[in-house]
Amino acid sequence: MDDTTLPPELAALKERLERVPSLGPAELEEAYVDLLGRKQGRVTKYLKLLAAMPLEQKRVYGATANTLRVQLEDAFRARRHQLKADSLAAPGEDLTMPGRRRWVGAEHPVTRVVDEIVEIFREIGFAVAVGPEVETEWYNFLSLHFPADHPAMDMHDTLYLDAPPVDNEPAGRLLLRTHTSPVQIRTLLSSPPPVRVVIPGMVYRNDAFDASHSPAFSQIEGLAVDEGISFIDLRATLTHFARRFFSASTRTRFRPSFFPFTEPSAEMDVECQLCHGSGCPACKGTGWMEILGCGMVHPAVLENCNLDGERFTGWAFGMGPHRIAMLRYGIPDIRLLLEGDMRFLEQFVP
């Protein structure tokens, strides 16, 4: 059936069908309601009129009207998709290109190391203790048995603040803590033994920012004070930590050292995780890597915390999670962990 034999109503519908691909968004929706609306749409009204037509007209015009209805619905659907695509596509943008991958955040490798260390010690009964990053000389040095003329107290090693001391705190200049050891003093002053804590936190030193040093870095210390604690307990605990953190077969060794706040003192080494003891550039051919310093708490430190040094003994250790992270992940430069370069950090996304 050609257009000349169509009744005026159907001829008008076919004409409207041809104009659908050129309609704008607002015009498209108005035309849809006018033509295909459920109650007042032109197609709907015409299909209702078919019931009163003679049988022959009903067969011919009914089939044509239904065909036009389907064609109109398809035309409206196609035009909507086209308008949506046009609105999303900026000039010169190729919608066939794959989408840009969104960067997904993850734990910083140092944060991951700190959390793992804390969890290992939590399993064997250690709590977590924290304290202020701004300290006085008494908490940071003098209470820890540093002599008043110790080089660490000089301004070329320690960052002092131009501010008056905090009220109700022991006298001394304010400074950015150089280790988390002041929290050991605060813990012993506030909690009687037995004490078993790990102390994570940021520390600050007047160091250059190079491949192995940073003026701000994280540290984690441990403290155990009770009656009858010996160096054997220290060695057994830290060996357990090393084998839990690195591997069950990791070897450890303790070398004599010196710290003002412990006596005797030691450096703890673990078997190089890169060459497994055979010697490589990372461990300077020794097969060992130093990971922490430790020792028995000096009796003078206990006395500064109002504890009887004859009755109580204890041990302490301190390590740098940045260095531990460098050992674990084979990172040659500490600056990579501190500069916030996402190209480097995204490789640690699980």
Image (cartoon, grey):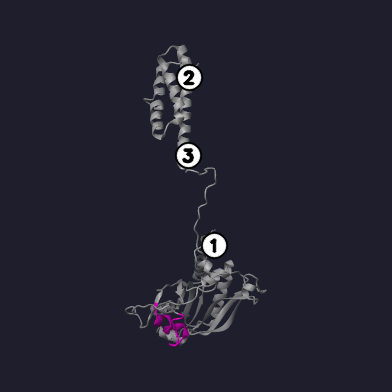
Residue 85 image label: 3
Q: Secondary structure at mark 1?
A: helix
Query: What span is colored magenta in the figure?
Result: 135-157
Residue at 58% x, 80% y is: 254
Q: Quick one: label 1 or label 3, which is nearer the N terminus?
A: 3
Distance in Å between CA atoms under marks 2 and 1: 66 Å
Q: Amino acid at mark 3?
A: Ala
Is 191 located above or below residue 1 in the figure?
below
Give whichever of 182, 196 is nearer the camera: 182
User: Nearer the viewer's eye, disc 3 or disc 2?
Assistant: 3
Q: Residue 189's x, y, as percent?
A: 39, 80
Q: Which residue is under mark 1?
A: 344
Q: Answer with the quarter of the image where residue 55 lies.
A: top left
Q: Which residue is under mark 2?
A: 64
Q: Secondary structure at mark 2?
A: helix
Is 35 located above or below residue 151 in the figure?
above
Residue most extreme to the right: 278
Distance in Å between CA atoms under marks 1 and 3: 37 Å
Q: Answer with the quarter of the image where residue 38 lies.
A: top left
Is 82 located above or below residue 301 in the figure?
above
Residue 329 image label: none
Queried whether the magenta region covers residue 139, the answer comes back as yes
The 10 Å Cα crowd at callout 1, few under 14, some 14 to 19, many 20 or more, is few
The 10 Å Cα crowd at callout 2, few under 14, some 14 to 19, many 20 or more, is some
Q: Secondary structure at mark 3?
A: helix
Q: Amino acid at mark 1?
A: Phe
Residue 64 can be seen, yes or no: yes
Q: Residue 296's x, y, as percent?
A: 51, 83
Give whichever of 86, 221 is nearer the camera: 86
Q: Residue 171's x, y, as percent?
A: 35, 83
Queried whether the magenta region covers residue 326, the answer comes back as no
Q: Quick one: label 2 or label 1, which is nearer the N terminus?
A: 2
